[in-house]
């Protein structure tokens, strides 16, 4: 082996990568038609691959659950935003329901990712409410100064 | 195999077509068999492992992710079989190979892969073969071997250095 390696190296100027690739091609693949037949006999004898497997079941309910949870979260947020924007004028922003009363349906029973998304949206709403508060105060001050 | 044809065959096999799966078996059985024999398995054990790997692939086709080539997934399954041998040490398998497969051994004469198998540890040899022999990328090799890409890159570099020294001097450092 050593001698033959030395001879080959002296005869070639190829890189080690080339040698590995070309020598790999000199090793024939272990073709065996009888083995294919044997594998296929086992495969065909395997009863109901999809019936035995868990994945198709998961593939069936998981997207529905995700879609349902997303829709529920969207409806919840839309409802809260609508309530906030359509409240009577005499309701100052500070009288709007606080964060603590937000529904927790999604977070409680669905998915941590969705729950955290809902948390983000709730935080966003909190910030909007604070902005509305300060805006309301500014408008009040302006109205008071105008009336004077 | 053409990637789109392979994707089509996998898709049909997933829907339950044994004929489509047979095309995949015909295509990949020789490569898988060669890999296992190179890893030191006797022909009988290699055939047995190939058969079990394909059967496992058929049963679990739904868990195959098309983010990876089908061959990567298949070699990963076969690799798991090697990692869970049924009680026989690898050195014993090499002995069986030497005794049983004169024909296979003949192809390794004057072949750098014979030197690689002799001088590299089994994992380094596996990474080298998967990358340079089967043409898997570093990421695919890492996935098959359940190793990091850095481990594969460093291992490949070291193995090539060892072989380079061997080819130039006759002995690794």
Image: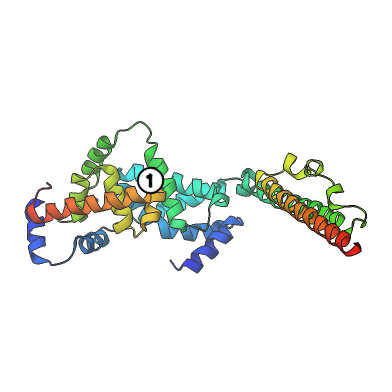
Q: Secondary structure at mark 1?
A: loop
Closer to the camera, B88 or A114? Answer: A114
Above-or-below relation of A109 to A114: above
Horizontal side, residue A45 vs residue B152: left or right: right
Which sits in the foreground, B154 or B92?
B154
Q: Position of residue A147 (x, y in %)?
A: 91, 63
Q: Residues within 10 Å of mark 1 (few under 14, many from 20)?
A: few
Residue, x 17% and y 66% (percent of image)?
A14
Q: Position of residue B89 (x, y in %)?
A: 30, 33
The percent coordinates of residue B10 (x first, y second) are: 53, 59
Is residue B109 visible to the viewer in this orientation of the structure?
Answer: no
- Nearer the observer, A88 or B32: A88
- Residue sitting farthest toward the front: A148
Report the residue marked by disc 1. Answer: B147
Rendered image quadrant of residue A18:
bottom left
Which residue: 81% across, 51% down?
Answer: A76
Q: What's the chain of the residue with tag 1? A: B
Q: Is residue A129 left or right of residue A36?
A: right
Q: Is residue A72 visible?
A: yes
- Please report the residue visible at 62 percent of the width from the left and 47 percent of the height from the top: A55
Task: Look at the picture and state if B72 lies above or below A13.
Answer: above
Give the side of residue A82 with respect to residue B70, left or right.
right
Q: Residue at x 47, y 57 (%)?
A: B70
- The image shows residue B143 at horizontal and vertical percentages of 42, 50
């Amino acid at each position: 082996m050593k001698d033959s390696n030395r001879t080959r190296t002296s005869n070639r100027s190829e890189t080690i990568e080339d040698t590995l690739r070309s020598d790999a091609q000199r090793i024939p693949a272990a073709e065996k038609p009888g083995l294919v037949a044997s594998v296929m006999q086992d495969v065909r004898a395997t009863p109901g691959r999809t019936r035995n497997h868990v994945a198709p079941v998961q593939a069936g309910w998981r997207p529905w659950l995700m879609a349902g949870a997303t829709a529920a979260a969207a409806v919840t947020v839309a409802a809260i935003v609508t309530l906030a924007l359509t409240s009577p004028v005499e309701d100052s922003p500070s009288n709007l329901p606080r964060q603590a009363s937000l529904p927790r349906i999604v977070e409680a029973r669905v998915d941590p990712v969705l729950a955290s998304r809902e948390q983000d949206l709730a935080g966003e709403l909190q910030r909007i409410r604070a902005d509305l508060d300060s805006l309301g105060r500014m408008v009040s001050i302006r109205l008071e100064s105008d009336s004077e | 195999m053409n990637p789109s044809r392979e994707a089509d065959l996998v898709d049909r096999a997933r829907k339950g077509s044994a004929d489509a799966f047979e095309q995949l078996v015909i295509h990949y059985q020789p490569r898988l068999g060669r890999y296992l024999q190179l890893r030191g398995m006797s022909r009988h054990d290699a055939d047995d492992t190939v058969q079990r790997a394909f059967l496992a692939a058929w049963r679990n086709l739904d868990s195959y992710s098309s983010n990876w080539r089908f061959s990567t997934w298949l070699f990963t399954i076969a690799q798991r079989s090697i990692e869970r041998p049924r009680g026989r040490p690898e050195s014993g398998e090499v002995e069986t190979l030497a005794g049983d497969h004169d024909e296979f051994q003949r192809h390794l004469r004057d072949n750098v892969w014979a030197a690689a198998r002799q001088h590299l540890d089994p994992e380094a040899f596996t990474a080298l073969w998967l990358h340079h022999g089967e043409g898997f990328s570093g990421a695919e090799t890492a996935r098959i071997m359940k190793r990091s890409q850095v481990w594969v890159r460093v291992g490949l570099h070291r193995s090539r250095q060892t072989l380079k020294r061997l080819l130039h001097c006759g002995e690794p450092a």
